[in-house]
Amino acid sequence: MNILHISASPRGPQAASRELSNHVVERLLARHPGATVTLRELAGVDEEPALPHIDAGYALALSSAANEPGVDGAQLRSDGLIEELVRADIVVIGTPMHNLTVPSTLKSWIDHVVRINRTMRPTPEGKVGNLPDRPVYLALASGGIRTGERARQPDFLEPYLRAILAMIGLKDVTVFSAEGLALGAERAAEGRARAWSQVERHFGG
């Protein structure tokens, strides 16, 4: 059992999305004690650099018919990230909402792994995923309220992630959401407690 843990916040271990996704991983390890965990820090932590954006060579390769394995740059990096994703039996993604949607670091990872004729293919009916489905857990954190009757902002985070993951074949998506984290200490505590309760209910804790 391989668990791929993607963390997108530039705050690293101090981020609410990272704390929530860590909790999800802990509950998964309790259920699968022999599982291995691969942590992929997208924003860079300590001396580790952030995941770069795709480059010109990658863009040119995707526009060609061959789309062969890369030898350097973003195309080679894409090959490695795709293989890492393919090996994962379970995927956990911890991310904050930035400007109503995904952070640029997570978008960069998506641009590397959502690759035509590798993880998805075009058909007359639209794009179809090449990856076999597996559980994906999204641990989302937002400063405001993005869901329900109290939401006062558009949400392009969860709908986008559900759509783009489905496009490569990953449709078994469960969402845990910590909201209102920038609305004062009391609201933040409520948002965290609600998210942790979502995890416990899901895993039967």
Image (spheres, rainbow, N blue to C red):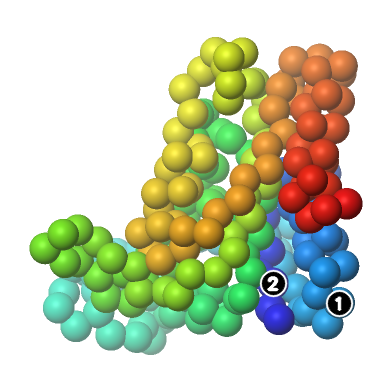
**Where is mark 2, residue-wise?**
3
SS at circle 1:
loop
How far from the left and from the top, in percent, is residue 28? Answer: 78, 65
Inspect this view and state whether residue 56 appears.
Answer: yes
Mark 2–mark 1 distance (CA, rounded to whole Å): 11 Å
Image quarter for residue 38? bottom right
Mark in front: 2 vs 1: 1
All told, the count of numbered labels is 2
The dot on residue 141 is none
Q: Residues within 10 Å of mark 2 (few under 14, many from 20)?
A: many
Asked where in the image residue 89 lies, by quadrant, the reply is: bottom right
Query: Which SS class for mark 2?
Result: strand
Horizontal side, residue 195 vs residue 49: left or right: right
Left or right of residue 26, residue 70 in this image: left
Residue at the location (47% across, 63% down)?
170
Horizontally, is 122 left or right of 138 in the view?
left
Depth check: give the residue in front, 56 or 41: 41
Counting from the top left corner in percent of width and height, residue 195 is at 76, 37
Q: Amino acid at mark 2?
A: Ile
Is the N terminus in the top left, top right, bottom left or bottom right quadrant?
bottom right
175 or 37, which lies in front? 175
Kindly identify the amino acid type of the residue bearing the numbered disc 1: Pro
N-terminal of the two: label 2 or label 1? Answer: 2
Residue annotated with mark 1: 33
Q: Residue at x 75, y 73 (%)?
A: 37
Given contact means CB atoms under 8 Å apart, are the residues at marks 2 and 1 in contact? no
- Residue 43 spot, x, y in % from top left: 63, 53
Residue 63, compared with residue 19, is above or below; it is: below
Whether residue 128 sits left or right of residue 172 in the image: it is left
